[in-house]
Every structure is written in C-alpha cells, then in structure tokens.
Image (spheres, rainbow, N blue to C red):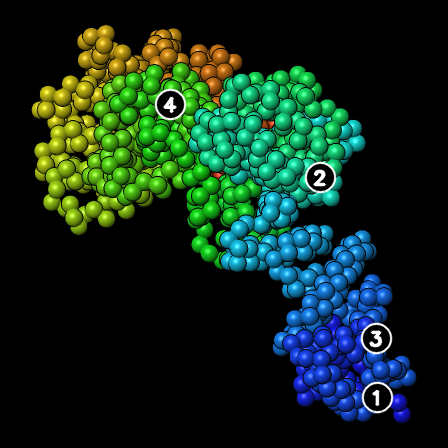
C-alpha cells in the first residue's frame, strides 16, 4: 500500500501521513516541507539561506542535510529528493496532496478548503526571509479567498442561497471584525430574508466593535440599512397593532360593503377621494375601519394618524403622525435615505431640526406650497409602489392649517390609488365643515353615518358574544336600555355577563372612554355637568342658570358648547327649553366622579334653590318630588319627608278630592288617574318606610310629629276616596286626636272634612250631621275663612240629603257669598263656588225647576273653564245631563252625559259613575234601544260595590225594576233574545226590585226615580 502524504496549509498547518498527523523535532523541518509543498522545488542554496540566514554556508548546508533526513525519516519515505547537487524537490513518485494548489487553481470550487490564513499560527524563529515568503503567500490566498467569497455571496444573494451566504459572511466577519462591508452585506442578506431582528443585532454588533476598539460610529451606508429595516419594522408593528381588534365584530354589513366598494373603486379607477365615518362615542367607527382595513393589507399600505382635542390649537400636529408613517415607508422602499428624508423635512419645517421633535408651531406660512408639493410628491411615489390608505381618526380635532393642507394635497392628487379615510364624532367645527363641504362639492367625499344598534341587533350581538351561555329577554332589555345600543357599551356589559360578575353600568373601560370624551372641559363646564348629573331628569334652562347663580347668557353659551360636543341635548317643551344629558351613561359617569361630600353639598344646594324658586316657577308636583329627592340625597331627611308629603298632597288634591281647593294646589298632575293610582300606592309605601326608618331617631321632634299627622291625614283621605273606609276612618281619627293635642287647627278641620266625605259616600246621615256641625264650629272658632265657607257648603249638602231644601239653599248661598267677597277670592275658589251652584241646581231639579237647574249647572261649568276631563267638572256635566233628561231633551242629555263618560274613563275612582251609566241606559231605553240597559245589568255588581254607596245600589235596582216592568207589561216590544236575557238576569219579582230600590234611593235627591217606581207599581197593581 502506497503512503499518502497530505499538506494542510490553509488554516493551522498540518502534515498527515495516511491521515495521521506527523510531528517533527524542530520547526525548520516543517518550514522546508511547507515551502516545497507550495513551490515544488528549491535550490539548496536558497533553502539554506531561507531557513538559516544568520548561519554561515557550511553550517547552513549541514543543517539542511539533517533537516532532509528528519523529514524523510518521519514520513517514512524519500519525500525530499535531490535530482542533482543543487536542487531539492518533493518526490513526484509519491502520493502527495495539498489544499493550497486546488484552492488557487479553482477557488470557487474549492472555497471550503480555505480554513484560515496560510500557515495560521506558524512561526519560525530567526527566519525573516521565510516570514516574508509566508506573508506574500498568505496575502495572495486571502485575496483569492475574499474575491471568491464576494463572488459566492453575489451568487447566493441572487439565488436566495441564504444559509450558505450567511455562513460565508459570518466567516468574513470573524476573520476581520473591522471590515464594515461584511456587516453591510450580512445586514442586506437579513433584510432580504425579512429578518429585521437579525439586521438590528448585526448592526449593534458592528456599533459595539467600532466604538470599543476604534471609538467611531458605523458609516452612513451601514446606518441607512439599519434605518430602512427599523422603519419597515416600525411601520409593520404599528399597522399590526392598529388592525388588532379584540372585539368580536357583528353586523354593519351595509357599512362594510360600502367601505369595501370604496377601496375597490380606488384601485380600479385610481381616483383620489375621501370617505368619512361619522358616529358617536363608542359607536364602532374604529372597529369598523380596522375590520375592513384588515382585509386590505394585500392591496394597500396603510398610514394612520390620531387627532386629539388638546392639540386642536397647535398648527399641523396631526401631520406629524402622517409624515412619521410616510417617512417609514419612504425609507423602507429606499426612496430617500434617512439623512435625505430628515433634510427634506427640515426644509419644509425650518423651525424644527428634526420633525419628530415636539415643536409648538412648526408650520411656517411661507412654506405652504413647498410643504404641499413635498407631501404630494411623497404620496405619489409611494402609491406608484403600492396603493396607499391614509386614515385620520377624530378629524374633528384637526387644526385649521392641517385641514387646509389636507384639502390642498387632495386637490393636487389625481389618478393615483390613494384612499383617505376620516372618522369624526357627530359634531363638526366650522373649519372642518368648510373643508368637507369643499370636498363634497368636488364629488370627492363619501360618508357613512353609524347609528346605534336596534333592539334586534343588540340582541343578536349579545347572544353571539355569550355563545352557549343563556340570557333572558329581560336581561337583553336591561343591557339594551343601559347601553342605548352603543356597541362598545354592549361589549363591556356582555363581558361582565361572561365573567358572571355583578352588573355595573360604569366598567373601568367605559369610565376610561368617557373620561377621554370629557377631558379638557373647563371648570365652568364641569360645574354645570355636576349640577345636571345630580338631577334625575331634564332641567329647564332658566332653572339651571338659577341653580348655578349665573347669568342666563353665560349658561346658554356653556350649554351650546356642550351640545356641540354631543354631551348635552336641548328639547322644547312648551315655552321651556329643557337641558339633559344626551346619554344616560354620561350622566352616571359625571355623578360617579363626585365625592360623597360633594354630592351631598350639591343636592342640598339644588334643593334649597328649588325651594326658593317655588313661588317663581310654574306650579308642578314634579318640582316638589324633585326637591324631596335632593333633600333626601343631601341627608336632610325631615325636609325630604316634608316634600314627599307635599308631592303626595298635590297629587291627591286633584285626583282624590271631588272639589279641590285651587288656591292650595301646585298645578295639574301630568299623568292619567290610573298611572297616578299606581304611583301613589308606591309613594305611600315609600313614605311609610321612610317614617319607620326615622321614627326611632326623630320620635320627639315636633316637625316630625307634624309630618306624621299630615301623612295620616293624606293616607286617610286616600283610603276614604278609594272605598277603604275602615282604614281611612282610623287614620282620620288619629289625625283629629293628634291635631287636637298639638293644637293644629288646619289638620283638625281637614280631618272633619274627610269624615264628612266618608258620610257623603255611604249616605251616613247621622254622622254627617254631627261632623258638619263640628267642622263649622271649629272653623268659626279658628276664624278660618276658607274652612267656614267650605263647611257651609258641606252643611248645606247635609240638609239637601235629608230634604231640608230651604235650609240647604240658604247655607249654599252663604258659602257662595263668602267666596265672592272679592274678585280675587272668586277666581281662587271658582271650583268651590261651582260645587255650591251644582248643589243648587240639584235642589232646583227636586223642585221640578229644570230650566233653573240647567242655568245653575251651566254657570258652574263656565266657572271651571269647560274642562270636562277633571273629575269635579265631570260631575257638573252629569248634573246638567240629568236636567236635560227630565226636560225630555234626550239627545242633548245623551251628548252631555257621553262627554262626561269619556272624561271619567281616565279615572280609577269616578264619582257618580253609576248614576251616569243608569241615566245613559235610560235614555236609550226610552228611545226603544234595550240592549245598553241589559248589558249594564250584566256588570251590576261592579257598579254597586265600588263605594258601597246605598244610592248606587238603589239606582241599579231602579233599572232592574224598570226592565222587569217592561217584561211584564210590554214584553212584546222586546225581541226573543232580549226576553231570554231579561229572564236570565232578573229572576225575582218586580216587587223585590222595587223594595230594594226604594229602600236605598234617597227620597229627596232621587225623588223623580222613586215617583216613577211608585207609578209603575200602581200600574201593575191596577192590572192585577
């Protein structure tokens, strides 16, 4: 087997025999072999001089012979031979291999053989000539290696051979860490491979090497590569963050289609335009923009900018973000170097050294055209590379210079795929309005207005967010009302449901969003919102000014500003302008921001000022309720209870008094009687609870005791009016006892009056006589003018009930005279006068003076301004209708009674309803229409049971007797169906119905009905 000798000279040198490294006794053996491996041959003289230059010739030749011997001995063959006396060469007969020969012959193919510099680390003592030779060969190999490496790198870059190229460059950097070109090539490689982090890592590796060793910075070329990558990475991260949307988006299908069509048209027709998204806070403008733009990144590059209210007065600040984004794209696409970009910005903004620096007023008017040209040029160049979207959010905060620049830039752009997208809230500044109108007139602006979700859309959104978690329709209604269909609020509330947390209208995220909306309001605006947030409903503008103790003009200016920002809203109600929060959630937020002590202070101030304004403001029970609420929230509980009772009293004045005293009232109640009945039941319950809570603390407080009397009076009055007599009498007797003890004459008189009303309702004549006398005596003793006049009327009514008509007429006329002492009194007590006139009309009816009765009743109605909807006035209409009935004017009677019936339909406890229904039925009966009377008898129990009034029972049995008589005497006038119906309804004899009717009807007030029944009875008796 032939020996194989291998020389590895590139890198750390090695000599191998059959792949086994060989070692020599001294380095000059290696040196001789290395020289021969490169050159093939050498003269003896040259070899001796090269290796032993400081020795004489004889010694050098002797050492050379010994060196040859050592080499051949170790390598076990005649590696070095002497073909003649002067030459040395490597034995061509042996299998000798080197790495340097093939490397130098074909470096591209054998680049891997270069493991390091030639004879790396080999040193020959006292061998300067040898070292010179080594340096020469080393440089030659290195140059070949570098040239080949760069050639290889270029091929690798063109062929995307990333890994091999990366390895070559790393080797080059390792061999010469100060060669900046290698770093630049490696950075370009990473840039091409879209590995920005490796570019940055390599750049800072270069920075550290140069700074540490040389104290210098990388060259502009290296910095430019770094800036390009950083710009691209920054832009991509910015867009990725911008497009990130954590909210599940639902709906807005039409709006999405409109946006997508806008972007598609921009690409197709290459026309520069703008699309405006309009909507309130939390409506989803940003979400919609991100939803659509997330699908446009393949076709568009995106630049975004946000405008802020605090920057609205600073010139061109919104364009800072726009130019920041454009600058990243410019550097990324190598349209300009970083240095050139900054120089261009400096030229356009001469007051700033670098545009990114915060300069209050970077815009110089003289450079307007230059800036417009610069922006247009940049946009055009970028759009040539890839279509461009410029999104400007909250453009309502753009300053005038920014809007001017935007308009001029758009005017100079045409036939480029550049899409501007703007978002704004519902308000528009004059400057923005001018800009938008100009774009609209040019046909370059589309708009999409986002509305809150409907109830159905909100339900779909909530269910989609909750997934499999169940939710009731009641919960959905609650969330819809709380959110008002605003998607952001809906999202927050559904997340609360998902986390199974207690519902709170103000989540941290909602607070943050509303905080931004209300940021930067001045202290006066804040004060107005604080006052308004303490009020439960809309507040009249004048009242608001009076609450704040400010001139009306100043408050109007503040309200106008807050309405412009869509925080408040105005509405007309009659002659009043009412101010309220546009969204309930904003009111809750403003109130939530107040400290507990500030809330109590404001509520107390509002209550006090409203109390002072009571004589000046239009009378309204709602105002009393508001004062009670504010006193309660300010923890002035006695005052709160007082005004709760005032509110209740004001309501009962009209809904539970037959003839309320107008001078004591505070205005009409705005709700129907049925609504007020439910409201008052709740109000009574609330006040009972308040009294129970306060009793322990304020039991000995005189003010509290007086309020207890008043509540007992109101409760008793309500119970009596609604037919709960036992409870009512108990409460009123309590009032009389306490009023007597505390010497409260007014409550004593009111207590007597309520017991008289009870007697009227149940026809309790003995007790009515007793209490009317007590009432009149107490009124005279107290010299209480109003009570005397009312007591005279009630005593007159008693005498009417018992048939003492002359005395009744005298007392009623006295009552009227009392109230007519002066025109002012007559106006205040018009309804009391009308009530007495109505009773005089009834006396005239009893005396068969029906024309006189009509005159009295018409006068009564005229005094009350013809308002039949009021309970007391409806009673006057009933009396008038009955007078026409007895005059035989049935059509006129029916018209009047129908008007009264229509008015009574809105009252839960309509006084004289039974009398009204009976007379209407009798009108139809006399016209030959029997069905209304039969239908009325079908619900006779309801008519009789409401007040347990004997007259009502008498009236119903009167009708039953009349119908029974008809069946007996004139049965042929009834149809077969009507006969069967009568037989089913009236199973007793005529005499049975006659007796009950006669017993319960008042022989004086119902004398005409009693007389008619007697006639019918006589006719039946005569026939028998």
Q: Are marks 3 and 4 in contact (CB under 8 Å)?
A: no
Q: Which residue is mark 3?
A: 40
Q: Which residue is mark 1?
A: 78
Q: Residue at x 68, y 62 (%)?
A: 172
Quarter holding residue 206: bottom right
Dot placed on the residue nearer the N-terminal end, 4 or 1: 1
Q: Can you give x and y, in whole percent of width and height, for residue 532 in the image?
A: 35, 31
Along the line of sight, which residue is nearer the eye, 201 or 511?
Answer: 201
Along the line of sight, which residue is nearer the eye, 429 or 348?
Answer: 348
Q: Are marks 2 and 3 in contact (CB under 8 Å)?
A: no
Q: CA distance from mark 2 to mark 3?
A: 66 Å
The disc at residue 300 is 2
Q: CA distance from mark 3 to mark 4?
A: 102 Å
> Is residue 745 shown left or right of residue 185?
left
Q: Are marks 4 and 1 in contact (CB under 8 Å)?
A: no
Query: Dot 2, crowdedness within 10 Å: few (<14), some or many (≥20)?
Result: many
Dot placed on the residue nearer the N-terminal end, 3 or 4: 3
The disc at residue 558 is 4
Dot placed on the residue nearer the N-terminal end, 3 or 1: 3
Q: CA distance from mark 4 to mark 1?
A: 111 Å
Along the line of sight, which residue is nearer the eye, 58 or 923?
Answer: 58
Q: Can you give x and y, in whole percent of width and height, for residue 544 in the image?
A: 33, 24
Q: Quadrant of the N terminus?
A: bottom right
Of labels 2 and 1, the one closer to you: 1
Of labels 2 and 3, the one closer to you: 3
Q: Residue at x 58, y 50 (%)?
A: 218
Dot placed on the residue nearer the N-terminal end, 2 or 3: 3
């Amino acid at each position: 087997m032939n020996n194989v000798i291998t020389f590895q000279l590139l890198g750390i040198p090695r000599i191998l025999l059959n792949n086994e490294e060989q070692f020599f006794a001294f380095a000059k053996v290696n040196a001789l072999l290395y020289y021969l491996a490169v050159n093939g041959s050498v003269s003896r003289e040259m070899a001796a001089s090269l290796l032993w230059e400081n020795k004489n010739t004889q010694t050098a030749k002797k050492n050379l012979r010994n060196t040859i011997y050592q080499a051949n001995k170790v390598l076990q063959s005649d590696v070095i031979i002497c073909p003649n006396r002067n030459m040395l060469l490597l034995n061509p007969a042996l299998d000798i291999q080197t790495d340097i020969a093939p490397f130098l012959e074909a470096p591209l193919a054998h680049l891997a053989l270069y493991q390091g510099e030639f004879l790396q680390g080999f040193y020959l003592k006292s061998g300067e000539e040898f070292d010179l030779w080594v340096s020469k060969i080393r440089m030659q190999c290195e140059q070949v290696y570098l040239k080949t490496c760069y050639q290889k790198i270029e091929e690798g870059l063109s062929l995307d051979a990333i890994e091999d190229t990366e390895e070559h460059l790393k080797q080059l950097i390792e061999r010469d860490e100060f060669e900046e070109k290698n770093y630049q090539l490696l950075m370009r490689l990473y840039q091409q491979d879209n590995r920005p982090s490796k570019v940055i890592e390599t750049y800072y590796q270069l920075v550290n090497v140069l700074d540490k060793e040389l104290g210098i910075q990388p060259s502009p070329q290296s910095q430019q590569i770094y800036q390009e990558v950083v710009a691209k990475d920054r832009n991509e991260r910015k867009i990725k963050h911008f497009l990130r949307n954590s909210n599940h988006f639902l709906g807005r299908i039409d709006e999405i289609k409109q946006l997508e069509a806008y972007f598609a048209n921009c690409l197709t027709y290459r026309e520069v335009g703008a699309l405006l998204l309009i909507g309130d806070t939390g409506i989803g403008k940003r979400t919609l923009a991100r939803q659509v733009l997330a699908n446009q990144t393949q076709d568009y590059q995106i630049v975004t900018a946000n405008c802020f209210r605090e920057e609205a007065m600073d010139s061109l600040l919104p364009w800072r973000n726009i130019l920041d984004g454009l600058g990243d794209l410019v550097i990324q696409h190598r349209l300009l170097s970083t240095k050139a970009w900054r120089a261009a910005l400096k030229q356009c903004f001469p007051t700033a050294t670098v545009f990114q620096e915060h300069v209050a007023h970077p815009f110089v008017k003289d450079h307007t055209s230059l800036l417009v040209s610069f922006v247009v040029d940049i946009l055009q160049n970028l759009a040539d590379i890839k279509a461009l979207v410029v999104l400007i959010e909250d453009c309502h905060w753009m300053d005038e210079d920014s809007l001017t620049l935007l308009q001029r830039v758009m005017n100079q752009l045409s036939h480029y795929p550049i899409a501007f997208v703007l978002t704004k809230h519902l308000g528009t500044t004059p400057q923005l309005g001018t800009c938008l109108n100009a774009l609209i007139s040019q046909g370059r602006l589309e708009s999409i207005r986002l509305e809150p979700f409907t109830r159905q859309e909100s339900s779909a959104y909530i269910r989609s967010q909750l997934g499999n978690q169940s939710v009731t329709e009641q919960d959905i209604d609650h969330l819809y009302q709380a959110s008002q269909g605003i998607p952001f609020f809906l999202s927050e509330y559904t997340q609360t449901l998902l986390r199974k947390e207690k519902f709170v209208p103000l989540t941290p995220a909602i607070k943050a969003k509303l905080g931004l909306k209300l940021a930067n309001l001045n202290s006066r605006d804040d004060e107005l919102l604080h006052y308004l947030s303490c009020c439960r409903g809309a507040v009249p503008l004048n009242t608001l000014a009076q609450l704040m103790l400010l001139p009306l003009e100043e408050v109007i200016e503040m309200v106008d500003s807050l309405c412009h920002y869509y925080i408040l809203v105005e509405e007309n109600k009659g002659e009043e302008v009412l101010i309220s929060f546009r969204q309930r959630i904003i009111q809750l937020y403003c109130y939530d921001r107040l400290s507990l002590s500030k809330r109590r202070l404001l509520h107390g101030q509002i209550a006090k000022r409203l109390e002072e304004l009571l004589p000046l403001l239009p009378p309204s029970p709602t105002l009393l309720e508001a004062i009670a609420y504010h006193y309660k929230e300010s923890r002035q509980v006695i005052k709160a209870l007082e005004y709760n009772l005032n509110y209740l009293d004001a309501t009962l004045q009209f809904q539970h008094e037959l003839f309320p005293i107008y001078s004591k009232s505070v205005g009409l109640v705005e709700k129907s009687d049925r609504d007020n009945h439910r409201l008052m039941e709740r109000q009574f319950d609330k006040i009972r609870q308040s009294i129970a809570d306060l009793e322990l603390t304020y039991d000995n407080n005189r003010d509290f005791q007086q309020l207890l009397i008043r509540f007992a009076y109101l409760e008793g009055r309500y119970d009596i009016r609604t037919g709960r007599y036992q409870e009512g009498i108990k409460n009123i007797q309590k009032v009389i006892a306490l009023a007597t003890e505390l010497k409260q004459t007014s409550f004593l008189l009111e207590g007597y009056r309520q017991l008289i009303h009870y007697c009227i309702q149940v026809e309790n004549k003995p007790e009515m006589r007793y209490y009317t006398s007590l009432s009149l005596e107490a009124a005279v003793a107290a010299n209480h003018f109003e009570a005397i006049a009312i007591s005279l009327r009630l005593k007159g009514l008693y005498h009417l009930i018992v048939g003492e008509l002359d005395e009744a007429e005298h007392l009623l006329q006295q009552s009227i005279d009392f109230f007519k002492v002066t025109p002012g009194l007559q106006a205040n007590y018009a309804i009391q006068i009308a009530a007495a006139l109505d009773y005089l009309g009834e006396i005239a009816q009893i005396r068969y003076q029906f024309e006189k009765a009509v005159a009295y009743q018409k006068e009564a109605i005229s005094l009350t301004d013809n308002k039949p909807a009021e309970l007391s006035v409806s009673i006057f209409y009933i009396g008038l209708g009955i007078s026409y009935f007895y005059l035989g004017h049935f059509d006129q009677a029916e018209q009047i009674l129908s008007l009264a019936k229509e008015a009574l339909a809105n009252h839960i406890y309509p006084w004289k309803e039974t009398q009204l229904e009976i007379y209407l039925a009798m009108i139809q009966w006399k016209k030959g229409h029997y069905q209304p009377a039969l239908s009325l008898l079908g619900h006779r129990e309801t008519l009789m049971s409401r007040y347990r009034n004997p007259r009502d029972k008498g009236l119903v049995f009167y009708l039953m007797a009349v119908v029974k008589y008809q069946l007996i005497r004139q049965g042929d006038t009834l149809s077969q169906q009507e006969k069967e119906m009568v037989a089913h309804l009236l199973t007793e004899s005529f005499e049975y119905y006659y007796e009950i009717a006669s017993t319960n009807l008042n022989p004086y007030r119902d004398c005409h009905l009693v007389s008619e029944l007697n006639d019918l009875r006589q006719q039946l008796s005569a026939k028998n």
